[in-house]
Image (tube, helix red, strand yellow):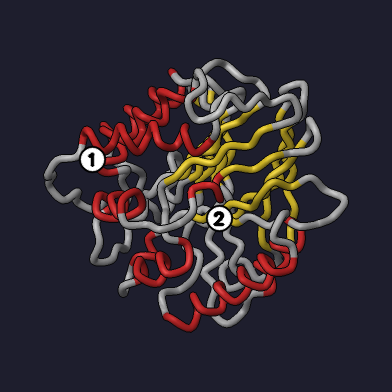
Amino acid sequence: MVKKTYILAIACIATTYCLSSCDKVDPTGVLIGHTSVDDRVKQSYYVSKKDRSDFERESKNDDYSFLVVADSHTTTETRRLNALFEMTIKPDENNMFCAHLGDLAETQPEYYDNVKKLVDKFEAKDPNKFAFYPVVGNHDVTRNGWSLFTQIFQSSTYAVAVKRPGYIDYGEDGPLHKDDKQDLFLFFDTANGTFGKRQLEEVLPAFMAIRQYFRHCFVFTHGNFFRPRSNAYSANFPREELYFLLNEFSKNNITTVFCGHIHKPDDRVYGGVRYITLDALSERNNPSKGQILKITCKGDGTVVYDNIYVK
């Protein structure tokens, strides 16, 4: 299999060829800021200076795990995020990374500074084991929040590859071929309640084109695809977009789609794809416990999902 940098270049080149002026996408039922999803996606690819090699992880064992949380809404209290990061670098566990599904902090500079200090602490504590992959939520882009977010994380639309023992590196000019020693992780920006034009017409097709070369493929985004109850105070994607995405994920054999936003847990299978909506990690929203989901990918292809709750 080729290097991850080459894989990501495929997606970036695809978007370069497709770029054109486009209309702003209207927000749908969520609190939004002054940036559009198309502007943010463009910045994630063409303005970001983040080292793309950060988006490749290597497991020493056939079995490995990763952690997922949503909606921490961080202010001055970082205890639960700290617990998440401690789990990520736990010596006796093979955790590749932790992912965050948006609404990371309330949009004030001092709250993002609290998150940055915590991320810096764990990157210094164990730079080889610690990796944190967030996407933006609607609260992350209000009141100039996107500027705060990008100062720390640069991108919100990207791909991550995890490779296991037996992976063959053919180099950047090597052939693409099916490789069950590699899994793919796709991170999308839905902070405006939509994937937007660029992600739907450019980024998603580029990512789906390379999906076939990986064993599992997991999707991470803020907006929820399903509501746990009919009167839930939350909007889904526009109907035509929702149907399109459900079909695309089913057609391309996506393993699991992880969502947040609604602060209520939900777990269902549609079109052969598992959709998991996580409860909020935030202490304000969940005073008694916050949800951390641990996913273990086994060498035989089995995927195990375990809920961990932190007080």
Of 68 and 273, nearer the camera is: 68
Q: Is residue 45 above or below residue 146?
A: above
Dot 2 crowding, Cα within 10 Å, few <14, some 14–19, many 20+: many
Q: Quadrant of the image for the N terminus?
A: top right
Q: Position of residue 198 (x, y in %)?
A: 26, 41
Q: Which residue is mark 2?
A: 100
x 47%, y 32%: residue = 7
Q: Quadrant of the image for the C terminus?
A: bottom right
Q: Is residue 124 above or below residue 199?
A: below
x 43%, y 40%: residue = 225
Q: Amino acid at mark 1?
A: Lys
Of 290 and 211, nearer the camera is: 211
- In the rendered structure, which disc, 2 or 1, sits on the residue that comes first in sequence? 2
Q: Amino acid at mark 2?
A: His
Q: Position of residue 231 (x, y in %)?
A: 41, 49
Of 129 and 172, nearer the camera is: 172
Contact between marks 2 and 1 (CB within 8 A): the answer is no
Q: Which residue is mark 1?
A: 197
Of 95 and 53, nearer the camera is: 53
